[in-house]
Image: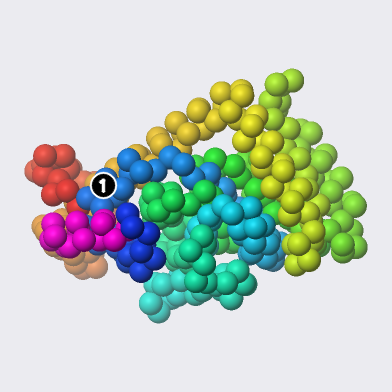
Amino acid sequence: MNPKENRDLLEAFSQGDRRTLSRLISIVENAESGAGPLLREIYPKTGNAFRLGVTGPPGAGKSTLIDALVKRIRLRKQKVGVVAVDPSSPFTGGALLGDRVRITATEPDPGFFFRSMATRGSLGGLAATASEVSDLFDAYGMDFVILETVGVGQIELDVVAVSECTVVVLAPESGDSVQAMKAGLMEIGDVFVLNKSDREGSDRAAKDVQSALSLRPSSPSSWRPPVVRAVASEGRGVDELLEAIGRFREHQSQSGEGRERRRRVLREKIREATERILRQRLWRDAGGRELDEAARIALEKHGNPYELAAQLASRLASNGRLNPASEEGSR
């Protein structure tokens, strides 16, 4: 991308052009060459959106709850962007778009933007560039950015590293409370939602969740995660959820914990961006050829993969391939 294209995109983005927002998201998601400079340009405009992570086991009703949340937020005249992470297609690498079917909040709405993203091999429940797309929504002027994890069970923990509040959605059936305990979700949740609470077993499930939460280490001044009972398909419990989120935000602000959480979010953002830069630099040019040669040697039984990997790592490090001065500025 040449400098003029970059300037034109940023100008259209600053004027609130939705097509440009969509284009910038694609540039970031696909790790195109201009992604780094664009993100550096828009970052000073971030810092106003509240980033809400929504996670939980498959079938708990995360997308239905988010749909209801979006409608409530829009009634309050606040703007919201949603990043819904779907499994990757095994054929194209793109998102399977299951969440788009379940989110019924209508577009075009100038105060709402929905984007479905593929995991593309990321194993923590979020797409690799979900944090950067959140920055785009933030700089675009959204009041809320909602990140929905892919819903794959026991690897949903990345969301806590990129959100200011994590909502864990459970359902009474299928032993969700037990599954959540196994997955470590009980430790990361700031607000818990027992969705589909009109179904049989909801009273027992609520008690199980409360009992599990009572085992979390706490102090008299620490936040105690509430359990909100909801029927998202009917809009019940959504106002109570927004109130609980509001109380959490106030607690974070008054206790100073919010600043520490933002520090951790920024630390994780820098770490992930650094790792992507190093991976891209590592395999470009000769690195890829050397990897192909190592694979050939292993295939012909002239060396084993572990020895070859150690040798390749030593060569790449010693020849300056990881020298920061060689960075071309793309990412």
Quadrant of the rendered image containing residue 70? bottom right
- In the rendered image, the residue lying farthest to the bottom is 91
Residue nearest the observer in this picture, 132 or 273: 132
The reply to whether residue 53 is visible in this rendering is yes
Residue nearest the observer in this picture, 93 or 103: 103
How is this picture coloured?
A: rainbow
Going by the numbered disc 1, the residue's amino acid type is Glu
Tell me residue 137's x, y (percent): 43, 54
Tell me residue 138's x, y (percent): 43, 49
> Residue at coordinates 53% horizontally, 55% vertically from top-left?
79
Magenta stretch, main secondary structure, is helix
Does the magenta run of residues contain 252?
no
Q: Quadrant of the N terminus?
A: bottom left
Residue nearest the observer in this picture, 188 or 110: 110
125 in relation to 213, above or below: below
241 in relation to 27, above or below: above
Left or right: residue 37 versus residue 67 is left
Q: Which residues are magenta?
A: 1-13
Tell me residue 266's x, y (percent): 41, 37
264 in relation to 195, above or below: above
Label 1: element kind: helix
Does the magenta run of residues contain 11?
yes
Left or right: residue 197 versus residue 113 is right
Residue nearest the observer in this picture, 184 or 5: 5
Residue under label 1: 41
The reply to whether residue 33 is visible in this rendering is no
